[in-house]
Amino acid sequence: MFAEILTIGDELLSGNTVDSNSSFIAQKLTERGYWVRRKTTVGDNIEDIAEVIEEILERRPEVLIISGGLGPTHDDVTVMAVAKALGKKLILSEEALKRIERFYIELYEKGLIDDPSLNEARKKMAYIPEGAEILRNAVGAAPGVYLVERGVRIFILPGMPREMKAMLENEVLPRLGEKKFIQKKLLAEITDESKLAPLLIETLKRFNVRIHSSPKGFGRYIGIILFGENEEVIEKAKRFMEKKGIRFEEGW
Amino acid sequence: MFAEILTIGDELLSGNTVDSNSSFIAQKLTERGYWVRRKTTVGDNIEDIAEVIEEILERRPEVLIISGGLGPTHDDVTVMAVAKALGKKLILSEEALKRIERFYIELYEKGLIDDPSLNEARKKMAYIPEGAEILRNAVGAAPGVYLVERGVRIFILPGMPREMKAMLENEVLPRLGEKKFIQKKLLAEITDESKLAPLLIETLKRFNVRIHSSPKGFGRYIGIILFGENEEVIEKAKRFMEKKGIRFEEGW
């Protein structure tokens, strides 16, 4: 099962915001057994977004998660770009409109905004591609969007981390099935780095685990991440490597 | 002038590492007047890396910065993938080899490694595509690579942030010319959000600045970033917006 992630926002391309959203999404997908094969980031530009979506659809991932550009301002154009890429019309979702209306009334009642009325900018967020479902936003105004195109399950989430995370947990992950993998991070103390590679390969052959390794500064430590279906298989793989002479410390 | 960034590493796709490298690179390119139009991340896989490089070259950015996968381990395959994508042979750089040798001798003399000899894994880092230049690594073993292909200036940097930053500052940025843009981050207090968009457009017309805006929670604040060639033009644009009724706070 392979997946792609697309994050959208000029602030990600000017370096003003570090894209922690895509890491969060990647982690959750990895835990569910998806192989995230590519992440892409483009700016708030309809043509650029539509182009990259067409490219991703050509690669036929099982899942595509898009984050960013769902808000009320003029540079929030993600849903329009998706509709363009898919050749679909945008239609007004009455359900989305009601939720948005209620959301701004609540903000008004809390004294956070001066005017709760549904102006054009706010109403814009209720338009979704025809045939799509809305995804509930538990903590913000803009609803997410879910649709399936050419076998690709496409989820469009907001870019604000708080909203994205809530929607991912509540609306996306339940549609993607059970947690399949857990992971353990270890620091391997290496007195001879050339020992490690063949040992990793042997461990992969013997146990149903995946292993990532990455250097942690020079000298004696290599960061190891063991992925497996449960604690037990990870513990077994770890013990096997320990018997072969690797000393581990937990975490990094 | 447009640019792309490609970051490489399985740890970025499993969500275990937040890709702060690409933000750092994006910021430095933006300051120099480049428009970073797309960022892509793929794993430590020769075919995937080669494929994405071919795609990027088709889009003909002026600059492509690649980060990650330059080290000695078996999953460091970036230079091989670039050579594959470009149809170039890998050749041993004597200069690179000498630097790598010296680097491991220094680590050995500091007591950080047991064996300073140039094994195959270490020697691998001295191979670069034919016609390429090496970029000096001030703080690590793996040299970077610089080459020009179909008018695209390609820089390959390590993935370890400390090494990447030093190489970007010392070896890449001097080749990309002077700092052209500075930026100022402001929080705009908005009593009516619909006021802001037309005012931003007017400001863009009058002053030689670029503006990014992004919501900062609900209610009264919108984050604004003003880009300009100097403090003066930014100050003028800011004062213009203040006269039109926007109240700013500095920073966010």
Image (cartoon, coloured by chain):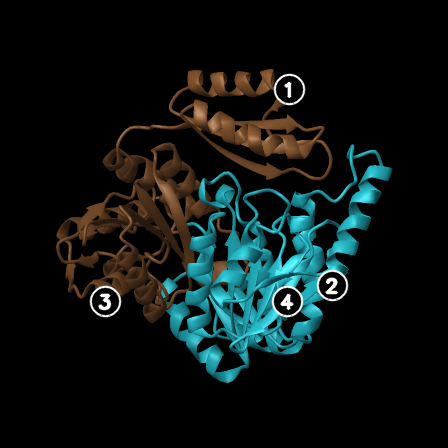
Chain colours: A brown, B cyan
Left or right, residue A88 beside residue B137: left
The answer to the question of whether label 4 and label 2 lie on touching residues, with beta carbons closer than 8 A, is no
Q: Name the residue under label 2.
A: B170
Q: Name the residue under label 1.
A: A245
The secondary structure type at the circle numbered 4 is: strand
How many residues crowd around disc 4 within 10 Å: few (fewer than 14), some, or many (20 or more)?
A: some
How far is disc 1 from disc 2 in space, using C-alphas? 40 Å
How many residues crowd around disc 2 within 10 Å: few (fewer than 14), some, or many (20 or more)?
A: some
Q: Nearer the viewer, residue B67 or A136?
A: B67
Numbered tag placed on residue A84 in the rendering: 3
How many residues crowd around disc 3 within 10 Å: few (fewer than 14), some, or many (20 or more)?
A: many
* Amino acid marked by disc 3: Lys
* Amino acid marked by disc 4: Tyr
How far is disc 3 from disc 4 in space, using C-alphas? 38 Å
The answer to the question of whether label 3 and label 2 lie on touching residues, with beta carbons closer than 8 A, is no
- In x, y percent, where is residue A145? 24, 50
**Both marks 4 and 2 on one chain:** yes
Mark 3 or mark 2, whichever is nearer to me: 2
Mark 1 or mark 2, whichever is nearer to me: 1
**Both marks 3 and 4 on one chain:** no
Left or right, residue A252 beside residue A228: right
* Amino acid marked by disc 2: Asn
The secondary structure type at the circle numbered 3 is: helix
Mark 4 or mark 2, whichever is nearer to me: 4
How far is disc 4 from disc 2 in space, using C-alphas? 13 Å
* Amino acid marked by disc 1: Gly
Q: Which of B154 and A201 is in front in this view?
A: A201
Mark 3 or mark 1, whichever is nearer to me: 1
The secondary structure type at the circle numbered 2 is: helix
Q: Mark 4 lies on which chain?
A: B
Query: What residue is shown at x 50% (from left), y 70% (from top)?
Result: B211
